[in-house]
Image (spheres, rainbow, N blue to C red):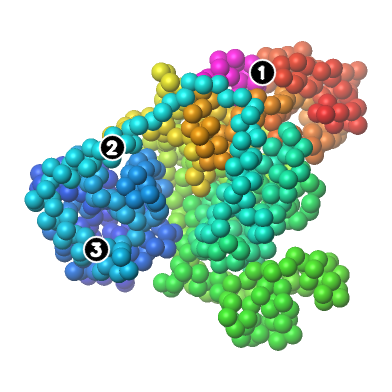
Amino acid sequence: MENEGKKPNHLIKEKSPYLLQHAYNPVDWYPWGDKAFDKARKENKPIFLSIGYSTCHWCHVMARESFEDKEVAELMNETFVSIKVDREERPDVDSVYMRVCQIMTGSGGWPLTVIMTPEKKPFFAATYLPKKGRGGMPGMMELISAVKKLWGEQREGLESMGDKVIGAIKEFHYGGEDIGEEIFLETYKELRQSFDEQYGGFGISPKFPTLHNLIFLLRYWKRSGNERALHMVEKTLQAMRLGGIYDHIGFGFHRYSTDRYWHVPHFEKMLYDQAITTIAYAESYLATGVGYYRKTAEEIISYVTREMVSPEGGFYSAEDADSEGKEGLFYFWDIEEIERVIGKDDAGMVSKVFGIDGENKIPYMGKPMPEIAAEEGISEEDLSLKIEEIRKKLFDERRKRIHPGKDDKILTSWNGLMIASLSIASQIFGEKRYSEIAGKAADFIMKNMLTEKGELMHMYRGGASIPAYLDDYAFFIWGLIELYEATFDINFLEKAIELNNKLIEKFWDENRGGFYFTSENELFIKQKESIDGAIPSGNSIAMLNMLRIGRITADSKLEEMAYEMAKAFSREVKNFPSAHTSFVSSLDFMLGQSYEVVIAGDCSSEKTLEMIEEIRRIYVPNKIVLLKPTEQDSSPITAIAPFTENMNEIDGSPAVYVCRRYACQSPVKDLDKIKEMFD
């Protein structure tokens, strides 16, 4: 046994896989909580805060170099009270101290290292630190000794520095201004300036997918007809799918590309990336009809359902970048191994298609399949069939390897994103199985992660723990709304409305509008965020939920609150619109063309189903869709959406009712007239 004979520290009773990875470190780690801070005050020691997550490559490196090293651990235990935090378990703590790091150093990342007073005032911040300094980078041994000396001799100066950092963080400039439609053009212009015309994506390297940028650009193309915006979307999606950031053997996307070309990825796979990427590819398929996008979305879903679903139906969080102590090893291929598995002739094909040779071990496609087929003098269909045959053999061989570690905690927020993603894909592709998987995940959350008071919990691993944050409510409500539109199961919509009321009760800022990230606060600031990170900001999705539920229930108060949110964050959004693309996409629903659609018809009627499918084939991102079953004497939807009460079949035939910008059109019962209602 790896930890046999070792004494555990205070993390041993935690549920987080990341914290448990450190439970047998010689560092005397504590989890975040009063016990650690009380000890620091009593012993007059600073706090050493280390934040990371279980699939973080450089977190593993720092752990091996320093936290598992007895020399470093002895010095840490003598100098500090040390706290370990899983950023995915405690995003509130991570978010505050990441801002600290960005203010103090100009950058951030994980592992995140912060040293602070027992009163939580930070005076040092960094990311990865080696054991000993090199190349201008401080080392743990030198740092600890320096902090120990300063703490003993210049403590007042350290506390003063902490006060200044806290003051800078608390400087938040609220808006109070209206945002007009000019914000859409400004956002597009910023994205266009940072767009990589040659290789797609934004910036140079490292290159993150930032799929919410593409989702905004699709909406901008829809509202403006700007073909350049659509080009930016398609160029990026195609380049990502060809690159090594995509797992060509087992499917799914890695976290980001370390280079400009999408070739060499950082190999961890995050649930949220799969969710948002699926939405981008699925919506792009709906907008363009390009089958390649649908195929990619379906492959991502096949990866998630194969590797990331718990027996109870919830979705796991991530797969590690490392296996056997080396990043990416699970995904590497030697040409000799490929020859052994599939033969020399087919190995030559793999080299041509995926670029595997003596130097490159990461599969990526240098050219699209049609170009390769033309060069080989065969049809694209025959080449695709051949490559799929080879892929399956390589996949079976790869399954025999030692797999990367899996972070098997279940987060409400990320599950909400995946539920929304599957439900959207189910609607667009007409694939009922996807909504069934999403429904099972939603049932898991509602069964296991709701308290008796109807409040959500954030994390599940052998039981639910930690009260939910804004993102948990916002993303899960989004998932439930999409799941209703995929299934028309009224229970999902009722729960979405119920949870939205709970969100308002617990998180709404009555004075300035917008939602706080936490309902309670144990830090020096109660945060309210609008900027997107790896995932959309909670306020951006919450605002969209408010608008959609407001339209469904005809509750004007919810729309008014959404307008208050737009004002609350107006200054931040205007200052840096391309960092707020999810927020601006929600503004597009508020300020642009949006629709309320009601299908009134017998649920078992073939024509009713055809009408639903016809609506789903049209790329209209800003809409709510309700089904009023006419075979029931009293439909539950009328209790939620009273405006549907008098919407019925016409002459015994199912009918579609469409309202746009608070004005309703005449209903239609002919399939070929439906599309005209959205022109």
- Give the distance between the C-alpha atoms of the residues marked 1 and 3, in whole angstroms: 60 Å
Q: Residue at x 42, y 63 (%)?
A: 57
SS at badge 2: helix
Categorize mark 2 by other alpha carbons within 10 Å: few (<14), some (14-19), many (20+): many
Residue placed most toward the observer, 551 or 602: 551
Q: Label 1 amino acid?
A: Ala
Task: Find out whether the residues at labels 3 and 2 contact each other: C-beta distance under 8 Å.
Answer: no
Is 416 drawn above or below residue 140 in the view shown? above
Which tag is nearer the camera, tag 1 or tag 3? Answer: 3
Q: Which residue is mark 2?
A: 166
Give the image location of residue 75, x and y in percent.
16, 62
Residue placed most toward the observer, 350 or 20: 350
Sequence-earlier tag: 1 or 3: 3
Q: Quadrant of the C terminus?
A: top right
Which tag is nearer the camera, tag 3 or tag 2? Answer: 2
SS at badge 1: loop
Assign the magenta stretch its main secondary structure.
Answer: helix
- Give the distance between the C-alpha atoms of the residues marked 3 and 2, in whole angstroms: 25 Å
Q: Which residues are magenta?
A: 547-564
Q: Which residue is mark 3?
A: 140
In the image, taking residue 337 as reference, residue 318 lies left or right, namely left
Q: Label 2 amino acid?
A: Ile
SS at badge 3: helix
Q: Quadrant of the N terminus?
A: bottom left
